[in-house]
Amino acid sequence: MFKQFDKLFGIDLGTSNTVIFEKGKGIVLNEPSVVAFDHHTGELIAAGSEAQAMIGRAPAHVDITYPLIHGVIANFDKTSTMLNYFIKKIQGRPSFLRSSQIYITVPCGITNVQKRAIEETIVHRGAKKAIAVEEPIAAALGAGLMLDEPIGHLVLDIGGGTCQVAVLSLGGIVASHTINRGGLSIDRDIMDYVKRQYNMEIGERTAELIKMQIGTATLSAEERSIEIRGRDLVHGLPRSIRLVSSEIFTVVNEFLDALIEAIRATLELCPPELAGDVMEQGILLCGGGALLEGIDERIRAETGVAVHIAEHPLECTALGTGLMLGVYRTKSKPLMQQDSTQEQIAVSQ
């Protein structure tokens, strides 16, 4: 089915990170979805990790932005330029997309117009064909779930811009709920907390570091701490303070409550049989938010449902596109290729 295409790629185009999967090679790129442009000339200065390193440290004429908001392209020109930058980085030239088929992930619940816009962005970069795939389906496949059976699975994908809850069965989404908040909103909440509580301003990267090092979804007897530096808003001078994990718990608590409510709302939309399947199968947790300490324990305690964190929570969505591309073989028919026969799980060489 794929012989007319020279190359096969899967792209997980996320608000925080872009992950690219290439047939025969696996994950070939995992970079922040960030771009830096010269405000005066409009020229690209950097993208990915290089642009992220400039956040909070760039002069006024450098505009650093995330071209995707809530998982949807907010600026088509900047997104297209960013993808072109990544393409050159992994292949040395932008023309490698010619005669290529691309599977690109999109949030569940977006409109057909938004899906077509993303597909057209990829084709505009030179791809012969682009197919938009809903992220929960790709994530579930990448985590090893068999989706073509009449069994309900609940996937919770906590990304940088959105949190998606979806119940899957027979290769499709039966019920879903999306929150337009994610890891980036937690970072902003931490920045606001430090500003409000300590009269000190910190940057996005410092907030992310706080989240990663002492962020927690549960209160524990062991208190962790971190020393951070920022700018005193009263005197305008550099200043350092020490934060503890219980403070960050209070910051993320509202976000977690909304997340758990989304799980409940999604299960309420399910037929009773599928809700029973979820109770038996548990919840699959993926995305960068799966790395927040204690989040599985918190969800389990609040819902009464077992929670399983994907083996590769940051990459499983991109790995799922590899399955759709036919890179892997499964004993069942793949979701997006209903005319091909497949066997036991193995890497296709």
Image (cartoon, rainbow, N blue to C red):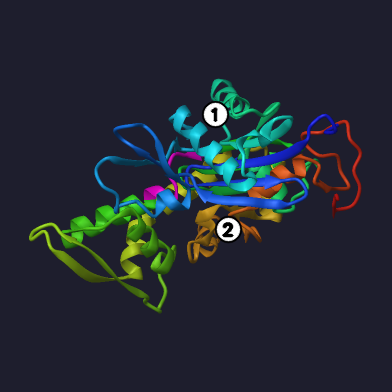
Q: How many marks?
A: 2
In the image, residue 252 above or below residue 125: below
Q: Residue furthest bottom?
A: 222
Query: Where does the N terminus fall, quadrant-wise?
Result: top right
Q: Residues within 10 Å of mark 1 (few under 14, many from 20)?
A: few
Q: Amino acid at mark 2?
A: Gly
Residue 324 in view, yes or no:
yes
Q: Look at 72% across and 33% down and name the residue there.
A: 100
The answer to whether residue 289 is magenta is no
| Label drawn at residue 27 | none
Residue appearing at x 60%, y 50% in the figure: 29
Q: Residue 104 sits in which quadrant? A: top right
- 178 or 50: which is nearer to us? 50
User: Which residue matches tag 2?
Assistant: 304
Give the alpha-carbon distance from disc 1 to disc 2, as whole Å.
Answer: 30 Å
Q: Which mark is residue 110?
A: 1
Provide the secondary structure element on which disc 2 rests: loop
Is 186 drawn above or below residue 248 in the view shown?
A: above
In the image, what residue occupies the spot 88% across and 31% down? 339
* Nearer to me, 309 or 63: 63
